[in-house]
Image (spheres, helix red, strand yellow):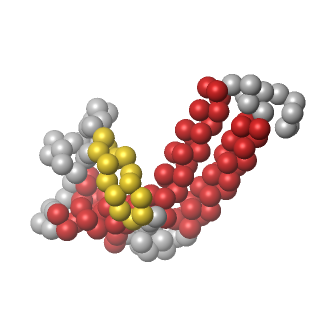
C-alpha cells in the first residue's frame, strides 16, 4: 500500500523493535554470534523458573543458545539437576534439542523466524517509505 497512508515515528519505532526482536531470536536459535541481552539466570542461585520475578539483564556475546549452554556447562560441570541443568541437557543432549533436532522442529523454527523477519523488513521498508 505504498503511497496510500502514512506511518508515524511511533509506528516505525514499534515495527523496528519487533523486527529487531525477531532478528535476535533467529540469531539465538540458529547459533549466530552476536551480543545478546539476556536475563541473568546463570548467576542467580535462587532463580526459579516458576517464579515470575525476572532477574536483571546482562549482555552475553557468543554463538547463540548452543554456545550459551555449552559455556554454562563448562562453568557448572557438577550440576546434575534443576531448571538450568534441564535447559542445558535439552539443548545440547536432547534428541529434539537445538543441537540434535531429531524431530525437525528446530529447522522449522528457523525457517518460520526467517519468514517473519522477512515480512517485518518488508513492512519496515514500507513504513519508512510512507513516513508521516
Residue 32, given in percent of the width and then of the height, sits at 46, 64
Count of marks placed on residues: 0
Q: Is residue 132 above or below residue 96?
A: above
Q: Is residue 85 above or below residue 2?
A: below
Which corner quadrant of the image does residue 56 belong to?
A: top left
Q: Residue at x 62, y 62 (%)?
A: 111
Q: Position of residue 53 (x, y in %)?
A: 28, 32
Q: Is residue 89 visible?
A: no
Using the image as rendered, state which of residue 71 and residue 91 is in the foreground. Answer: 71
Residue 70 position in % (x across, y down): 28, 68
- Specify the quadrant that holds the C terminus: top right
- Looking at the image, which residue is at 23% across and 42% down? 48
Q: Nearer the viewer, residue 16 or 76?
A: 16
Residue 27 position within the rendered picture, expressed as x and y whole percent measured from the top left: 49, 59
* Residue projecting furthest to the left: 78
The residue closer to the viewer here, 109 or 81, is 109
Comparing 114 with 81, the one in front is 114
Quadrant of the drawing holding the N terminus: top right
| Displayed quadrant of residue 5 | top right
Q: Tell me which residue sits at (52%, 70%) in the image.
A: 103
Residue drawn 29% across and 45% down? 58
In the picture, measured across the screen, residue 111 lies left or right of residue 83, that is right
Q: Is residue 79 in view from this perspective?
A: yes
Q: Would residue 44 appear left or right of 112 to someone viewing this image? A: left
Amino acid at each position: 500500500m505504498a503511497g496510500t497512508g502514512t506511518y508515524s515515528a511511533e509506528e516505525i519505532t514499534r515495527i523496528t523493535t519487533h523486527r529487531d526482536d525477531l532478528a535476535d531470536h533467529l540469531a539465538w536459535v540458529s547459533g549466530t554470534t552476536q551480543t545478546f541481552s539476556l536475563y541473568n539466570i546463570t548467576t542467580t542461585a535462587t532463580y526459579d523458573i516458576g517464579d515470575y520475578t525476572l532477574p536483571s539483564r546482562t549482555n552475553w556475546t557468543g554463538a547463540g543458545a548452543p554456545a550459551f549452554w555449552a559455556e554454562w556447562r563448562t562453568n557448572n560441570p557438577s550440576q546434575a539437576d534443576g531448571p538450568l541443568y534441564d535447559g542445558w541437557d535439552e539443548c545440547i543432549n536432547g534428541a529434539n534439542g537445538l543441537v540434535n533436532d531429531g524431530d525437525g522442529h528446530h529447522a522449522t523454527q528457523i525457517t518460520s523466524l526467517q519468514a517473519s523477519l522477512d515480512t517485518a523488513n518488508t513492512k519496515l521498508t514500507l513504513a519508512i517509505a510512507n513516513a508521516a
